[in-house]
Every structure is written in C-alpha cells, then in structure tokens.
Image (spheres, helix red, strand yellow):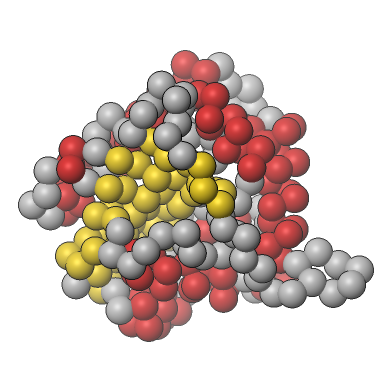
Amino acid sequence: MLKRWCSSVVSWLQPKSTELSVGERMRADWDQRARQNPQYFVATSREQWNDGDFFQSGVEWTQEQIMSDMLSIARGRSPKRMKVLEIGCGMGRVTRSLAEIFGIVYGVDISLEMLLHGKRVLAERTNVQLCQNSGADLAMFSNGTFDFALSWVVFQHIPRKAIVQNYIEEVSRVLKANSLFKCQVQGYPIPEQDADTWTGVGFSEEEMKHIAHNAGLEILKSSGAGTQYYCLDFLKP
C-alpha cells in the first residue's frame, strides 16, 4: 500500500473569466491524455505498450541515466538512505525502478489521472509516495528535504518560461546542500506564443545559465543545447 498521498493547490497565472489558467490547462490536458492512452503519452516510442515492456523501458532508462552516474548522484551517500524527488512521475515508469535503488522516492505530477494509474502499478512499493502538485511548485515539501532530484521529458511540455524557472528554484529550495538535480528541457527556440502543453517553450544556454545563477545552482554538465533533449546536471553547493 502507498503510505501517503499529498496535494498542493496553488494557482498559477490567474484565469480570465472565460479561459483556463495555464496550470488548469496543463492539468486538464494531461488528465485527458491519461484517460486516452497513459503509457503512450509517457513514452511515445510505441503507441501500444504492455506493462512488462513499458516498465522495462523505465529500467533501461534508469540504468543509462542514473546507475551510470551514481558517484555524482550519491556524492558519498548510501543510496538506500537517500530521499529522492521525481518531478513529473506520470504513472511511475521510472519511479518503480528508482525505488529499487533509493531509500524513499517521492513522485509528483499535475495529473491526478496519471497518479491513479501509478497508485495501481506501484501498490507494492512501500518506499514510494505519490503527490499531486500544482504543476508549478513544490509547496508541499520543506527546505532541504531531498538528496537528489530529477525530471525527464517533463519540462519540455511546459508552455511558460516562468513556470520552468520557478520549478528549478523550488528544486534548489528542497534539495540538501551538495545534492544534484538532473533535468531535461526543450532546447529548440520555441517562443511562448507557439508553445502549448505538448510542445513546450524552448530555452537557450544563456537562459539556463541565468536561471541556475538565480536559483543558487551550478551547472556541472550539459548536452543537447538547441535540441529537444537539452539535458543539464545542476549542483546545489
């Protein structure tokens, strides 16, 4: 059984009387995608997945991106004593394999529909806690809670730069000192007026350097600038 559900209801960009706010639109769109075909909208390399292959793809990603870099991620800590945050956990494709490595894994997502799928598939993982958040912050967590944070193919779907920047600042707040944040953002120069909840706004290297500085983070390494898979490792000193 999952130990706890948590939620944060924080408005982002107040809606006009006849329009949804950005946060409401993100939540509505991702709930609809979760009802339609949750596995595909989490991992688009296949339109139809079976559970075994879907979660095996999460294991393979974890081996490539996490296990291969454990010295930098753990930074002298025992993985089984680490508390980890996954932003945009969806239905737990990666969360499940992270729970095999780390002591406690918190997954947050804006979509309750995705989290309900996650509750089903992660029911036996007693060290996983799923939380619905606002899609813009980590208000349910105290300062210095986590030893490591990650977000993969999540920020690339966010249509406003201010939201991504706020997320990165929030990650800095909830990380302990000497902790790493691995993330991926949209690197194509997509302006906000062309962005939506699927093809998110793009960031340049200069913008990410500015965001890191404001958040009190150091960019240890980056790759894929100018592409969809602009990946960065941030360190909170």
The image position of residue 55, as x and y in percent, is 45, 25
Is 18 situated above or below 182? below
Locate residue 24 relative to residue 76 in the image: left or right. right
Can residue 186 be seen by looking at this rendering? no
Q: Residue at x 52, y 18 (%)?
A: 51
In the rendered image of this protein, does residue 232 appear above or below residue 59?
below
Direction front: furthest residue:
3
Q: Quadrant of residue 230?
A: bottom left
Q: Quadrant of residue 75?
A: bottom left
Apparent side of residue 46 relative to residue 139 in the rendered image (left or right): right
Residue 178: percent from the left, percent from the top? 17, 65
Q: Quadrant of the N terminus?
A: top left
* Image: 8 above or below 108: below
- In the depicted view, which residue is nearer to us: 82 or 191? 82
Q: Quadrant location of residue 184?
A: bottom left
- Residue 130 location in percent, x, y? 48, 41
Along the horizontal axis of the image, is 103 left or right of 4?
left
Q: Position of residue 95 (x, y in %)?
A: 40, 36
Residue under the image location 24 percent in, 34 percent down? 101
Is any atom of residue 18 visible in this view?
yes
Q: Which residue is found at the position 41% from the left and 78% from the top?
A: 211
Q: Residue at x 46, y 52 (%)?
A: 87
225 or 108, nearer to the observer: 108
